[in-house]
Image (cartoon, helix red, strand yellow):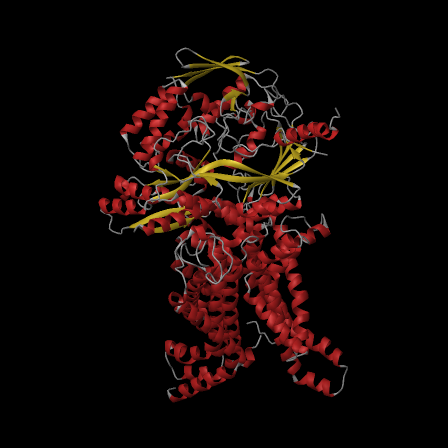
Amino acid sequence: MGRGAKALGCEFLRRLWRNRLAVSGFGLLAVVLAAALLADVLSPHDPLTMIVKERMLAPSAQHLMGTDNFGRDIFSRVLHGARLSLGVGSGVMLSTVGVGVLFGLLSGYSPRLDGPIMRVMDAMMAFPAILFGIAIMAVLGPKTFNVVIALSVVYAPRTVRIVRASVLAIRQLDYIEAVRAQAAGHLRIMFRHILPNCLSPLVVQATFNFAYAVLAEASLSFVGAGAPPPTPSWGNILSEGRIYMQTASWITIFPGLAIAITVLGLNLAGDGLRDVLDPRMKT
Amino acid sequence: MRRKPGLFAMVPAALAAILLTISPAVAGAPVQGGTLRAALTASAPTLDPHSGTHLAIREIGLHVFENLLAFDAKFQIVPQLAERWEASADGKVYTFTLRNGVKFHNGREMTAEDVRVSVERFRAVAPRRNELDGLAKLEVVSPSVVRMTLNKPDASFLAAIANPICQLAILPKEAVEGRPINKADIIGTGPYKFVEWIPDRWVRLARFADYKPEGKVEAGGFGGARNAYADEIRFVPVPEPGARVAGLQTGEYEFADFLPSASIPQLTGDRSLRIVRLGPQNYPTVYFNHTGKFKSLKLRQAVQAALNMDEIMQVANDGDGRVDPGLYFKEQVWHTTAGGKLYNQKNPAKAKQLLKEAGYNGEPVVFVTNTSYDYMYKAAQVIQEQLKKVGMNVTLGVYDWPGSLAVRKDMTKWDLFTSSHSTRFDPSANDFYFREKTTFFGYKNPKMEVLLDKASAATKFEERYKIYEEVQKLTYEDVALLKLYDHYTWQGHSAKLQGYTPWVQVRLWNLWRER
Amino acid sequence: MTVYVIRRLLGILPVLILVALGSFLLVHLVPGDPAMVMLGNDATPQQIQALKTQMGLDRSLPEQFALWGRQVLRGNLGESFFLGRPVTQSLMERLPATLQLALLSLVFSLLIGIPAGILAAVRQNTKWDQLIMITAMGGISIPSFWLGLFLILVFSVQLGWLPSGGYAPLWDDFWGGLRILVLPSISLGFMQAALIARMTRSSMLEVLRQDYVRTAKAKGLDWWRVTLRHALKNAMIPVITTIGTAFGVLLGGAVIVEIVFTYPGLGRLVVLAVQRRDYPLVQGALLLASVIYVLVNLAVDLLYGVFDPRIKYE
């Protein structure tokens, strides 16, 4: 480990930098991240202030993306919405990775635990995702944090599956047998030997989970089961603008673009990572 | 002297033009036939008329069922299944004489026995059955006479009979005797009879050939002559407003209810459609939880002072409304502006002052609203902003309608709550909000109870009106609840449909489709 | 192999039990109950309680679950509170609509995705490849409801070419029904088409790189025969296996598209049932959707084993 890992790391970053997909993906993400972090600075107006007289104004110099039906500036709301989307997305990504690693390792490593764990995962994956999300939100109540929980529950099973698949493949490798023959402890084997080799598909899946979460959060908000107002969420803005599609289509265009750009960035980054980490995994 | 023929020729033309513009509904004689497809907002949870207060139940039900009495366009009580009624001198005994030869949809003729069984079943299951708590005895005097005896005079008794909300519909004995809630057979006496219900797809009604209209068409409202011209009516639940608009434009529906105001400009330009405004349909309200922090009068007054109803109306309904303090609409005889000075104050400075006096220290205020009713949801967001501006820390709890009702039951979980009141046909319908025993938001005011008791005992309209004026004044002074604005809704129908007048809710009788 | 199949079939049972338990718990944990919804806004707590007792909702959760579970095992999904008819009947009425939508979306995604992927692979790194891949990238990034809204705005409202809602079963009115299904299927299937295109492309590329293909090309065999016959067959394996998951995704994603297009399918039925707390209907629908998903995936898994001899089933 040690110096070898650093060298691997540098090599990885160098290859990543050369990969066009990864660069454009992370570039887009950097823009979105900047928007989220600098939202307060970049917003020309307060995203929550309603000036009823200025309702539904088309995009102009003063309101780059127009105003919504409450008289709030959409540009400021879209910028702040980035916070919510990135926040929920990263929360979901981290928790699904955590759960995925934990249960994937356990499941792949121990045939005894494999059965029950996979049955539960299969059952969870059998629920239609959006209905599952709506139901969990209804049970937990309307809070942003609950959106993270709900989406993590929905997307954890596929992460568990991915980790488990890697573990199964690696477990059969000769060198693991050798390590086992050396009577190393199970935990040590799992975390030191097996896990590092699972990282590639895991990292790629994590990026895609982030993308799914951003889309899913928008979908939940769209049907009214997402983060509560007045917190700006791209899905909320889209949903509010829906009935004004013909008279004020800018209310739906811009948040939709924001979602598309973010998800595009994540997909590109995921593709790029996959190229770099394991060209054999190309799909 | 030469006459100017041009001028004289113009007179009849001018007369015709004037006549045509002032009587747009007079466009020829009614024509029978055709199918009317009406797009409504919600699916009815049930078609059993005694089983719920949901709007969708009566939107359909009023075409199929009838009551002993009905409200006409002027909100006055007129005969429907009872052709006349007499009240005894002491106001305790009402004798209803039923019309002769009224047939049920199953062919049988209606008798007083059917009335008795229907009323008894209503009293067993209906959500608003406590309005008949004063009914001590119901006797069948003869096959066409029913006598009802109250244990004390009640001026709102007839209104309870005629109330279209959760109709006291008369069904055949065999359709309703002993049936639990939701389980009555859908057999009535109305101009249309029930054919089929595919839930969430449509409800089909067919013209009832043996229907005998009662009274005059001009009476209007839910009473008077209700003729069925169309062969079939199909009520289709279309919850998405955009889909109702689109269906109206493509001709998929001949009638569409609750059109979003955003679509009105473009729809009015469409010459194949007529867009009408139903106003008002309801008024949104905000309830206080009087057992929590809003026990404090000053705190309630602060909220009352801060609200700007014009802005709320602008956003919640795109300006389609009327700012008016009355707890009954201007169009109703019960309307009054008593207490109106405290309505729509739009006074943030005063609100801030009142907050200080109330000793408010930034405690979080939980405002529960729901996504099922767009206008309530939007109003709540505007109110949250307005209250924030005067320094109140308001968080929104957003649920769907049943979820919000569940939260409302737990008095520790909310401080403010959005709701709405649809057209009330008699002021007694609002009593239960203000009585300690029946209120669900913890209201307790002995002065109010005294007023309501007086109103219940009064028999003359003028007397009752004065008392309910006091009630409204007290509602504002004590800030029992807040009325927001009069909410208008839009309806649209095909230009080929004649005879439609918007009033209270969709009514498809006395309508015909031009060839 | 047969032992494996039987074992897998038995393995589904615990999954289904978990799904049943999950559906029951989920819907009962949501605040609010059907009695409240039925009686409306102004009902008193006493009236609500009385109705709840009548509906059997005041019994303990385990007891209610046991009752429902026993019913289900006998093949009876119960009766919907609001529709007043058996759940199975209500679901079967709406299932064809959703199936038509999901199948048509699947057809759309395959018809667009596979040829696009093949083209991109065969013309790798040319303008075609880049164009197709960029479009595919866009396709997996655009929310389906946004796409749906815009399709409605352009094709229904502005151009008036296609309807924005409604329903006509294909076996009743083929062309009419198809016209209604076009926009929703595109909204729903676009993302899957993009995914399939990408997968087809990479799968094709991998196969095209294989020695035997290069040998065949070197030998000068008819290039198209080589590509289409041999490469395609092997490249299709991963694609075919994703049909199972694609179908599941489409069934799930149909919910949002059904809402946008007011399409009377299972998705909208379930959303409405959740809003009304129609417990038997929600439980039954979730159970049905999960059963379909599990069975389709099982079938695909088994087929995968049949097609790819490299997979070893212990």
Picture layout, residue B499 above or below residue C107: above
Nearest the viewer among C3 and C232 is: C232
Residue C133 in the figure: left or right of residue A118: right
Picture layout, residue A25 above or below residue C285: below
* Residue A259 drawn at (x, y percent): 50, 64
Residue C110 in the figure: left or right of residue B504: right
Q: Residue visible at 33% across and 31% down?
A: B473
Q: Residue visible at 59% across and 26% down?
A: B190
The C terminus of chain A: image quadrant = bottom right
Whether residue A192 is visible to the viewer of this picture, yes or no, is yes
* Residue B221 drawn at (x, y percent): 54, 27
Residue B296 in the figure: left or right of residue B51: left
Nearest the viewer among C197 and B216 is: B216
* Residue B499 drawn at (x, y percent): 63, 31
Picture layout, residue A99 above or below residue B203: below
Residue farthest toward the front in the current orientation of the protein: B1
In the rendered image, which quarter is residue B440 located in? top left
Nearest the viewer among A85 and A196 is: A85
Picture layout, residue A273 above or below residue A245: below
Nearest the viewer among A106 and B439 is: B439
Whether residue C13 is visible to the viewer of this picture, yes or no, is no
The N terminus of chain A: image quadrant = bottom left
* Residue A239 drawn at (x, y percent): 50, 54
